[in-house]
Amino acid sequence: MQLSARNQFCGTVKDVKLGAVMAEVAVDIGGQELVAAITRASAERLQLQRGDQVTALIKATEVLIGK
Amino acid sequence: MQLSARNQFCGTVKDVKLGAVMAEVAVDIGGQELVAAITRASAERLQLQRGDQVTALIKATEVLIGK
Amino acid sequence: MQLSARNQFCGTVKDVKLGAVMAEVAVDIGGQELVAAITRASAERLQLQRGDQVTALIKATEVLIGK
Amino acid sequence: MQLSARNQFCGTVKDVKLGAVMAEVAVDIGGQELVAAITRASAERLQLQRGDQVTALIKATEVLIGK
Amino acid sequence: MQLSARNQFCGTVKDVKLGAVMAEVAVDIGGQELVAAITRASAERLQLQRGDQVTALIKATEVLIGK
Amino acid sequence: MQLSARNQFCGTVKDVKLGAVMAEVAVDIGGQELVAAITRASAERLQLQRGDQVTALIKATEVLIGK
């Protein structure tokens, strides 16, 4: 499946922190850290753990620009 | 000003495409392209143009993970 | 690839409307219409057109509840 | 009040899971599950509980398309 | 209908700018301007025009904090 | 740094509620309350506390209109 998301970054999971409802997933993308806040249920369904190869996806409409 | 956005990527504007209401800004971040869809009025207010040094900001809650 | 997005609805593209920067994609999901606003470049990259089988993905954090 | 949100799905609350800050609300919309992550305070203000008739609202700009 | 959105600001439409797909709506909320980018079809469905009394709704998860 | 976010409201932090992964920050902006849900790690990095002068930032694409 090809996705409409304009921003797709491949990386390696560095850390997964689980809360009651949400989870925080830190991904190393070429030396830079990218953090995702997803539901805990999604983190568990994907069985996310340190070392996993993942893709971080971000819609263009969600990006702000600072100059 | 420090921002709560967990994801902050520095880069160089490669291209700005203006629509009537929206604008698409392509940013080169270390060889990878990141695309932002912002309002045209914001692109004009920041006078965004090819070569500008900018920061792309993304809230953690806006990131999806694929595995 | 499995995705963290909690909401994934399969359907058929009913209509694609292209603007300069953005595109609007109407998807029929079991008789109900779901509308996505994505970048025109994404609509073109996926070559979206009427009749395509697609999946609409929505993060749980993007959903509001009214009661 | 009429809302600009292009996607409005009526359904029945199946489950509410409360965290410290966030809450997860599962809604049955015609046999399909839709999940919303809202703040716990909102879930409490709306007194959301299993069996409630609710409407799930999603902006078109928040929807991704996969093909 | 009560909505889960934590941020609900009443105001008066100052300006509506229509693009092909998107529309920009400027709302005066107590002397401060708030801008919404919605689809053109939503702006037309709500028949938004200068002087309309409206409510701007924003999920808490969409707000960034700068300090 | 100038930001593309169309909506920037200055205010004073009234309350910070910390969860395991997320945090809820209530900001008083001229007598009206604005609530942000950010990651706990961001709230801690910015050392947000009652009385802080902050700016709440919201992209135009995240705003819904009700009429």
Image (cartoon, coloured by chain):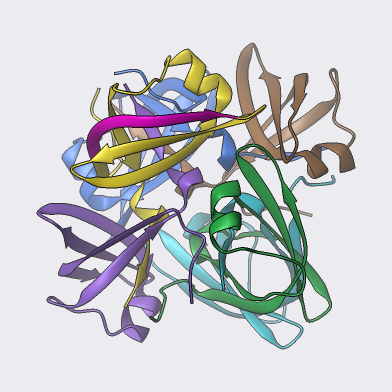
Chain colours: A blue, B brown, C yellow, D purple, E green, F cyan
Reply above or below: F41 against D22: above
Reply above or below: D39 against B40: below
Reply above or below: E53 against C49: below
- The residue shown at (25%, 56%) is D35
- Quarter of the image with the C terminus of chain D is top left
Nearest the eye: A37 or B27 = B27
Is A61 situated left or right of B20 in this image? left
Say if the magenta span includes residue A11. no
Say if the magenta span includes residue C10. yes
Nearest the eye: D30 or A62 = D30
Q: How many marks?
A: 0
- The residue shown at (77%, 68%) is E50
Please tell me in which quadrant of the rendered image residue B34 appears: top right
Magenta part, dominant SS: strand
Q: Is residue C51 visible?
A: yes
Nearest the eye: C38 or A14 = C38
Is F35 situated left or right of C56 in this image? right
Is B52 situated left or right of D21 in this image? right
The span shown in magenta is C9-18
The image shows residue E63 at horizontal and vertical percentages of: 59, 60
